[in-house]
Every structure is written in structure tokens, then in C-alpha cells.
Image (cartoon, rainbow, N blue to C red):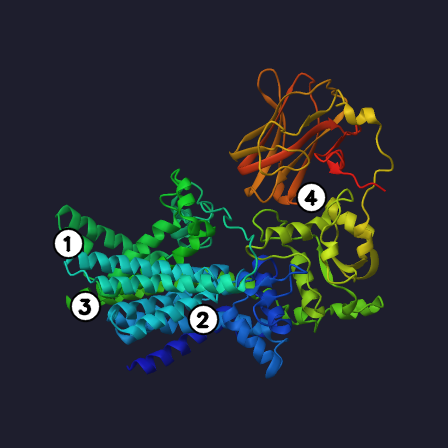
Amino acid sequence: MSDRRAILLLLVLLTGLLALIFGDVFLHPNRYLFGTMGDSIKSLFTFAWYVKFDSGLHFSGMNYPWGEHIIFTDNQPLFSIPLRYINRYLFPLENHLAGIINGLVFFSMLASAVVLFFILRKCLLPAWYAILGAILIVLLSPQHYIISHQYALTNTLVLPAIWLTIIRLFENPGKVSRYVWVLLVLLAAGFVHVYFLPMGVLLLAGHLLWFAVQQWRKKSFHWKQIAALLLAATLPLLIFKAFLFFTDTITDRPETPGNFIEGKANIAGLFYPVKSLAAEVLKTVSPAPVPAEQNFGYVGLATILCLLLAALKAFGYLRKGNFKQLVNPVLPKLLQMGLWAGILILIFAAAIPFRFGLMHLLDYLPPLKQFRVLHRFVWLYYYVFTVFGIFTIYQIFRFLKLRKKRLLANGWLTFMLLLWLADALVLLKVEADIVNMNKLANAFYGKEAYHLSDLLKQANRQASDFQMIIPIPYFSDGSEKIGYHNWGGTMYQSMKGAYQSGIPLSTASLARTSLNQVLLRTQLLSSDSIQKELLPQLPNQKPILITVTDSAEKDYEKRLVQKAAFLTRYKNITLYELPLATLKTVYREPEKPAKDALQLLPANVVYETFSNRNSAKWLYRKGALTAETGPAVLFNNILPNASDSLTYEFSVWVNATAAIGIPTIKLEEINARHEVVNQQSVNLRGATEIYKDWLKTTIPFRLKNTQNRIKITAEGKNIVADELIIRPVKQPFYFYAEDQKQLIRNNYPVYQP
């Protein structure tokens, strides 16, 4: 069978399987949304909005009034940019974009199978078997595990294409065109999703290391060749960084998003993830509960069995002292290189050695700090090791056939391939059922249920009357500092309404968003005690459209709704109009406090301005408590003139720009026996009281015993805390700021009438 015919057969077989597995969503992709929450609806919205409304490299659908660079929106610029031109100049696509983005997912499955077919053929496997192997590897891909969450990262073509390009490069490392292809493929991968670019570079680096070691062992080190390969590994990153440098104007994107260790690969996610066949088998044989972990790079029971056989074979070499066979197994060159690179990638994805108390090493490796989901790198390991699994299965089959054990050979091959298929179908069917649940594309377009513009007409309004949408329940994500995870119906409903009407969202669910921009727009949620610094920066005085899905539950959400005027309601969606004038209104002190109230610290109030602590950042008065790592003790003492019948309020301001991540503030009441009798903690990630670049936390409490000690600590990194006040709730406390002009009341600046 020729390769052309084999590829045609492969595409026919895989298309039929995908149609059977995914059913109507495969046959009619424009009827469905793969998901309606979190990254899923965000990825669709950023893709669709850009194609419909935007141009260039700017996305305007969220983070109003600034918008965002498309690289940080997960909208797959490699596809969205050309589709934007098609939509604008050739034919309209606005009502087909869900189908297009869904179709790209299925297309990537078919295309990746073709790429894997070529890789398997390079392993000298027959065409008929390479067809089966390519299909099985694609069906089991761990990327399908996020098919209902992230469209870009679900693209199964990118990583096999990178690997094939690297294989071809090392087949002829002296050919310039092979380097050009590596550069183009890696850059294209970065414009599908940024994560794919460092993944590909790491895979190339692993191959380069193997190649260098082999040349060193043979004492035929070609420095020019190594230098060219090293340039091939670094140039794509340099070009991509240069592209961002010249096109991205934001200077305060978070550089250390955190979660480096939390997102690492682990044993459960690799060998028996939740919903997998391996997990079900383990449950039947293990008395201990099987940990439920998502699929990081599950290679399937068949490949695991092949790896066990390979381990036994390696142990045999080790016993005999045959280190040469151990280091250079009898495998095709591409598999030798791939396995070496795959092992190195697996070590990195498992956060080794950083997880063993060596996180401080990241301070010397700042590029690594950018990765917060390390287990995604295991996908590279998956493709390399499943190709090894397919190769090993065939080699054992061939070994048995050559020894005239045809029945055993056929039984082995049939069992292993069916086991692989069962493994793949168990996982993929779960994901297929999820995406088939959301037949909502027409509703997203506004063809069914309601169109936001029609609802506005009922209230004698139109989309052009408003400048932005604030969704309630509120959600915001991307600054790595503060955020609000209300990923239920509010994301779907607000993004649907924005897409239909063309009114951008004030909030955002993006990546690496400017902290200053996030603080300014989130300050709209702050109480009337804080002036809203964003209002003078808005391009016009049009009101804000508030869309409430179900109800407003948080205090800051209720406060906004109470300021707004009701427009209309449709089922669980309520629209309100919020004039900017209502947000400009702030609490004003009716009269100045008496002089003695300013000069004297009330006997039952604790005030600490940390004036004895040197700090580059401070809020009202010079000095602030600083700590590189927590827990930092802010207060640890008995309250003066305490009462157990009063409700107290503790408050402190923490600088958001200085902190890595965001601190958690803990208040403990400790008795004479050093026992904690009361404890409360607040994670400042959910702060809404924002003044300049400071976040305020407030904790109300009552003492169980007036002789108990109050201990307040801040947990985190690079902590800068200032203006600590503990007072009875009904006891006002005034003081002047450093300039002796700005009056402060209860830790808020006072705006005089």
C-alpha cells in the first residue's frame, strides 16, 4: 500500500470514528459550544469578538477601556487574524465562528494523525500498522481532556508537527531549509498558543543534548553544527520576544504568576488519572482509595505494559553490565533521541529538582517562573512514549511471527490494540458527552432565546447608549494578584450579550493582564469611601450596562445594583443602567473632627503606621512593614482597654505591586495557654477596597476574653503592609497623613465637602 492511499484510508477511518464518538457535534459543529464556563467560553469569545469587531493586534472585547494584545487572549492569532480579513472583505462569518473554532479542533485531530503516520513510517513500521497506530495515539491524546475548557491547547496537530520537523532537522542537520522549517513551525505554534513555543523549544533542546552527547562519545564534535542547532532552539524565542517587545506597550504584566509547583505532573495524573481505564482497574484491585487526578499525560495501559517490559529488559542489561545497550537501545534513531528528550521533559514537568526545597533556584531562572501549569509539558512525553509503545507492540508481534508463533503473535497484537482502543474510548467518550450537552451556538449568536439588542429596545435603549458591561456575579482573572472566580452562568451570559451587542466588558478573563489596569477597573467595586480613579480616564460619559445573571449576592455587587436603574428582565437575566455620576459620588465627612480627636489616640484603639520601618513604599505616613517571606507578624499583643461586649474591626493596607502573588492575612485570638480560640483569615486576592496600588482588608471580630492576645500575620512573599488599625466598630478614629493636609478616617481618606 502506498503512503498516499494509506493516508486517505487513515483519514476515512478516523473521520468515521470521530463521527461515531462525537455524534452530532462532529457533523454539525456550528450548533454547539464546547463549554460555557471559564476558559472555554473565554476562548470562544475572544476568538469570535476579534474576528467580528477588531483589527491588527488589538482585542477590545474585555478589559475596557484598554482592551488587550491578542497574544494574551488565547484567541489563536494564527487563525483569527486571517479569518478576520475573510469576515471583513470576503464573506460574513459572525454566525459561524463557533463551528469554525470547533472544526479546528477536529481538523487538528485528523491532521495530527497524518503527521503521526509519517513519524511511525520513519520508525520503519508498515503502512497498515502505522495507520492503526496514528489513530490510536490521536484518540488517547491527553489534550482531549481539556477539550471542553481550552480550544487552543486542544490542538493536537501542533506538538506532533513540531516533533516531525525536529526529526527531519536531525536527519540532515546540514541542510539550511530544515532550520527554516523548524523556525516557522515553532513560531506558528506560538501563535496558536504561547505555551506551545517553549514546549517545542524544550523538545528541540532535548534532542540537541542527545546529539551533542553522541558526538562527544564518538569524539567527532562538530562545533559549527552544534552552534547552528543551538541557534535553531533559541532564535524562535528571541523573535517571539522581539515581536512582543515592539508590539506590546504594557510594562506591568506579572512576571511571576506562581503555582509553579502546584501545577506539576504527578504519578496519578500520568498513570491512572480520573475516568481512565487504569484508574478503574486499580479501584478493583486496590483497597486504598485511588486519588482523583486529571489527565496530565496518560499513555494508556498498553504503553505502560510496554514500558514495564522495557524496564525489565534494561534491568537485564544492568545486571550483565551491558551499559552500552542500556544507553543506546536497539531503536530507530528518532526514538532514541525522542525518548531521551521525553525523559528530560518529564523531569521538568514534575518540577524536579525545584519541588525538593529548591524553589529559590527559580530566582536565577526567571523565564521558568512564567510557567504555572507544568504538567502541560507532559504532552510531549505522551507523543514520544506512545510512539515507542506502538513500535514495541509491533516488534514483539514481529518477533513472535519470526519464531512461527503466529497465533500468539496475532493474539498479542489484537489484545494490545483493542486494549489501547478501549482506553481511548473510555476517556474520549466522557469528553464527547460533555461537548454534546451544549447545543447553544445559535443562542450565543442571538438567533434563539434573546438578543441583547432586542432586550434593550424593550427599555427604549440601544447598544450605542452604553460604553461597557459590568457582569454580576462579578468575575475577573488575569492579573495574578486579585481575581474573582464566578465562572458559572455569568461568564456565558455576559460574553454572549457583549458579542451580540458589541458592548465590551469592563472586566476580563485574560492572561498576564496589566496590574494597574486591573486595579483601576476593579476599583469601581470599591465602597463610596474611595474615589474611582478610572472615571476621568473613560473616553465618554455614557452609562454602564449591568447584566445580572440570577442575582447579586456579594455586598459590592448589591451596592452597584442599588445605584443603578432597572431596565428590563428576561428569565434569569436582569439589565440595569448605571450612570457614571452615581460612581462619582463619594462619602464626604460632614464636618471636621475636634482637635483633641486628632491629637489623641483613643485609649481603646490600636494604630500602627510602622514609622520605625524603612520602606520605599508607604501609604499615609512614612514607613511600612516589609518582609521577603511570611508569615510576617503585623501585631501580637493584648488589646488596650479591651471589652468582650464590643465588636472590633481590624484593618490594614497591603501593597499589590510589591507582592509576589498576593498575601493572606490571618487574625488569631490566643489564650494564656497559647491555644488559638478564634481564627479568621482573608485572602487579599478577593479584595475590592482599592486605593492607588494598595488593597485593604477588614476583619470584624469579638473577643472571647479580654486577656487573650491578638496575633495578626501576613503570609506570602515580598509583603509590604501599612496603616494597621484595630478599633471598636462604633469608635471613629481620625489622623492626618504625612502632608498634614489629607485627613484619614477609619483608614480611609476623607473627601471634604
Q: Amino acid at mark 2?
A: Ser
Query: Mark 1: which secondary structure?
Result: helix
Q: Is residue 92 above or below residue 336?
A: below
Choose the circle earlier in sequence order: 3 or 4: 3
Q: Is residue 331 above or below residue 374?
A: below
Q: CA distance from mark 3 to mark 1?
A: 28 Å
| Label 4 sits on residue | 691
Choose the circle earlier in sequence order: 3 or 2: 2
Mark 4 crowd level (few <14, some 14–19, many ≥20, 10 Å Cα): many
Give the foreground label among 3 and 1: 1
Query: Mark 3: which secondary structure?
Result: helix
Choose the circle earlier in sequence order: 3 or 1: 1
Give the foreground label among 3 and 4: 4
| Label 2 sits on residue | 108
Does the rendering let one see residue 614?
A: yes
**Residue at coordinates 80% horizontally, 51% vertically from top-left?**
584
Closer to us: 19 or 549:
549
| Label 3 sits on residue | 401
Q: CA distance from mark 4 to mark 1?
A: 66 Å
